[in-house]
Image (cartoon, rainbow, N blue to C red):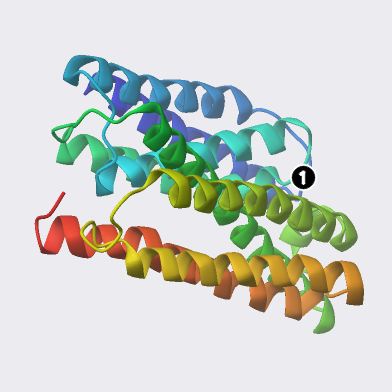
Amino acid sequence: MTIVLIAVVLYLVAFGLLVAQLHQEQRRGLRWLLPAALAVALHLATHALAWRQAGGADLHFFSALSLVGLGMAAMTTAYGATGRMAALGVVVFPIAAASLAAYAAYGHARTEALDWRLQLHAWCALLAYATLAIAALLAMTQWLQERALRRREFHGWLRALPPLVELESLLFRTITVGFILLTATLLTGLLFVENLLAQHLVHKTVLSVLSWLLFGGLLLGRRLRGWRGATAVRWTLTAMALLILAFFGSKFVLELLLGQA
């Protein structure tokens, strides 16, 4: 529990340093990097120690939520260390802290042995959700930036963001990586997950495929028709909403409301 508390505090320290940096209208600055990196390392250590003690990994609702938060925090830290979009940490680090605290409060669920194929499917899914969640945050940031520029509202926080063209390029690169991971998730699920009806996975699969089609359609539209701006934001957020419903919506209902593993 001490590790969790330290990690949460470090996430909040990194958040506070980023807020101060944005308030000073600074695009670059790495004072937040050390506490963020330490928080990510301790977040990972929390899961590793819990899995070692329990004899295996679990992917119950709060554990999966915490792992996605960990992935988002790790990617944000990596982005920020290269001078790109450190401002995402203002949203991501509190999410990571809250998800870790919820996981610690709920406790480590009883685990069942999973073979390497199902583990591969699960890790592809978690990486895809974390990557595409970052893409959704980038899309919302782009929308806010475009909205402010159209209204000629030159807020100080705009100066702390990268140029719109660079932000848009980062958005589509992130979507591309997330789309590849989501494709791997669907393929490994198709190959390795048996008896979808008995496992209550049909609705999850349908929603995930719909999300995959939207992300794929957006990337194709970008390549063939140059889609950007509001169109890209709408497609990204709609596809991400379907993905959240597919994974966390179904896990919430099955595990927390119905009490099924």
- For this rendering, which residue is in front, 230 or 249? 249
Residue 184 lies, in percent from the top left, at 57, 46
In the displayed structure image, the side of residue 138 where residue 249 appears, left or right: left
Q: Quadrant of residue 142?
A: bottom right
Residue visible at 42% across and 33% down? 117
How many tags in the picture?
Answer: 1
Kind of residue indicated by mark 1: Gln
Residue 232 lies, in percent from the top left, at 74, 73
Kindly state the secondary structure of the residue where label 1 is placed: loop
Q: Residues within 10 Å of mark 1 (few under 14, many from 20)?
A: some
Q: Is residue 69 visible?
A: no
Residue visible at 51% across and 38% down? 71
In the displayed structure image, the side of residue 57 where residue 68 appears, left or right: right
Residue that carries the numbered disc 1 in the rendered image: 26
Q: Is residue 132 visible?
A: yes
Residue visible at 56% across and 33% down? 74
135 is higher (above) or lower (below) than 16: below
199 is higher (above) or lower (below) than 151: above
In the displayed structure image, the side of residue 258 where residue 151 appears, left or right: right
Task: Identify the residue at the far left of this view.
Answer: 259
In the displayed structure image, the side of residue 161 where residue 72 appears, left or right: left
Q: Quadrant of the N terminus?
A: top left
38 is higher (above) or lower (below) than 88: above
